[in-house]
Every structure is written in structure tokens, then in C-alpha cells.
Amino acid sequence: MPLGKIEEAKKSQEQAADYLTDDLVFVGKKLAKVGLEGLNFDTCGSAGDADFLAALRAVEKLKKDLPDLPILMGGSGEFIIGMHGDLNYNNQRLAGMYTCDQAKAAETAGADIFGMAVNTVTTESVPWNLARAVTYLKATTAAVNIPVHANVGMGVCGVPMMEQPPIDSVTRVSKTLVQIGKADGL
Amino acid sequence: MGMQIAHIMASGMGGIRTAGDLVAWMQMTRKMKIQDAKTYVAGKLGIEMIDLTNEEIMRDIREDLKIATVTSIAGSPKGIRAKKKIAELLDINIRSVDLFKTQFD
């Protein structure tokens, strides 16, 4: 892509997505044979729209072959980065997709739970970030019929970006996401 | 562990200390949202929804139903044997239990 070979770069991403889908399905099926109780695809889309598409396709394939395998599909941010830009799922463009539509895509693919991630903006306060996360969460839980869990690691969904986030911040975030945001889990 | 404990104390249901694991199973296996999952589990246990997180009540229930307690009881099922009973109680399939059963025959 730095050389300006946009089409070639897009093709390489599409190919990488195919490989990723194959890998996710391969690992999922192997684990299923040894009694896997549930699978968590975490941080989907961290490398952009092709990454998210690969996870959606993997969920689809695994649920087709193993309908009794619970799958949790989690996002990596409030917004899918358009590293490719022209990839669609179920006639919806993935690039620029916000959490409501991410959850709908996950539900369509067959995921049992969607994990919502909203990145904490480090230059803003905890209340500012929490209000932003709750806004996304309320809209996302209302948009789908599957449970929505809020991802609450360091720097996600209002939790401050630090190794040991302060307890008073974390407990406020935790309680607010559940009571006001209507999270089905964390 | 600081962050995890803060989350557990602020909004956790309590896991196998109470009925948190049972509610989680219903979300995972039946795609139930939190209220539906709590209602379902409370119905199966024959208790009010508010008691799902009451450790005093759930300790006795878990002991009676043999679905494991946070501190193991001598002679009582734990691990996969307790999980088998959880699957039967909630009328769900737990894949590890299914595999376990096939290896028993």
C-alpha cells in the first residue's frame, strides 16, 4: 500500500482474510473435538474490515457444522477501520461500521453473544468516556436479540487506559454499564 | 487482579458462589438476554429472581441439587460431575459433559 499499489494491497487483504477464516475454523473444530464448551473470538476487526469479515465467516462456518457450540464474537472498537474499504457482509459495508451494526452482523453470522468494545479516549475524563460507552451500549443492546456484553479491559468502554486502573473508576464504569447501559454481561 | 475484583464486587453475580454460572450458561446456549436468563434460572430453581445473587440461599440450593459450591463438600459432585447435573437442571447441552458421557460407556 505505501507504494501506491492499492488494488494489490486489497487483494492481499482478501487473501489474508480467507486464510484467517480457515485458521479460525480449523482451531475451532479441533477444540470442539475435545469437548469445547464455548469459543470467544476476541478483538475482531483490530486489523480492519478484512479481519472482521474473516471472523464473521468463521462464525458462520462453525455454527453450520457445530450448531451447539456457543460462540462469543467481540469487536475491537466502536468503529471498524477501513483498511480495505470495499468489503461487505450481508450487503452492509464493514468499513466504518459502528457497534449497533457490528452486533447485527455478528447476530446474522450466528454468534451467541456479541462483545462490544468502545476505545477509551485518553485525553478525556472518565465521565466523558463512560457517557460515550453507555450511549453506544444502550443503542447496541436495543438493536439485537442476542446478549451484548461490554468489554471492560484496560482502556475499553470507559475503563481508564492504565495497567492498574483505579478501583473507584472501574466500579463506577462497571455499575453504570450494567444499570444504565443495560449490558447483558461484562 | 485489581480490575477484575473491582468488576466482580461492583456488578458480578457471583459465579458458582450464587447463580452467576447458571445465568451465563443460558446466555451461551440459548442466546438469552440477561433478564430472560435470570427468569429462566429462577424458575428452574423455584426461587425469586432477587435471590439468585443471595449467597445464603444459593449455597443451600446448590448443596441440595449437587451442582457444586465454591468450597467443595466431601463426597458431593464437583467439576464435570456437577456440570452434568447443571446441564440436566437447566435442560441444556454442555459439550464437555456430552463428551464425558460418551467416554463412560
Image (cartoon, helix red, strand yellow):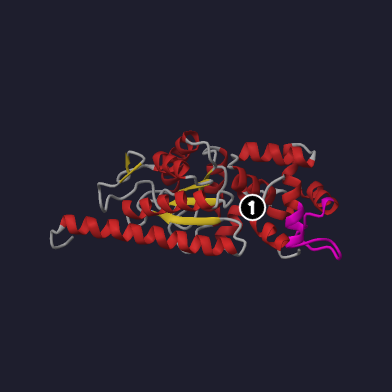
Q: Identify the subunit bearing mark 1.
A: B
Q: Which residues are magenta?
A: B65-85
Q: Please name whichever residue, A85 or A154, is drawn nearer the observer in this view of the structure.
A: A85
Residue drawn 35% across the image and 62% down it:
A19
Horizontally, is A21 left or right of A183 in the view? left
Q: Return the residue at label 1.
A: B9
Q: Amino acid at mark 1?
A: Met
Residue A120 in percent (x, y) is at 40, 51
Residue drawn 72% across the image and 45% down it:
B90
Residue drawn 38% across the image and 46% down it:
A78
Residue A28 in percent (x, y) is at 51, 60
Residue B89 in percent (x, y) is at 76, 47
- Provide the secondary structure element on which disc 1 rests: helix
Whether A37 is drawn above or below A103: the answer is below
Q: Please name whichever residue, A2 or A69, is drawn nearer the observer in this view of the structure.
A: A69
**For residue A161, what is the image quadrant?**
bottom left
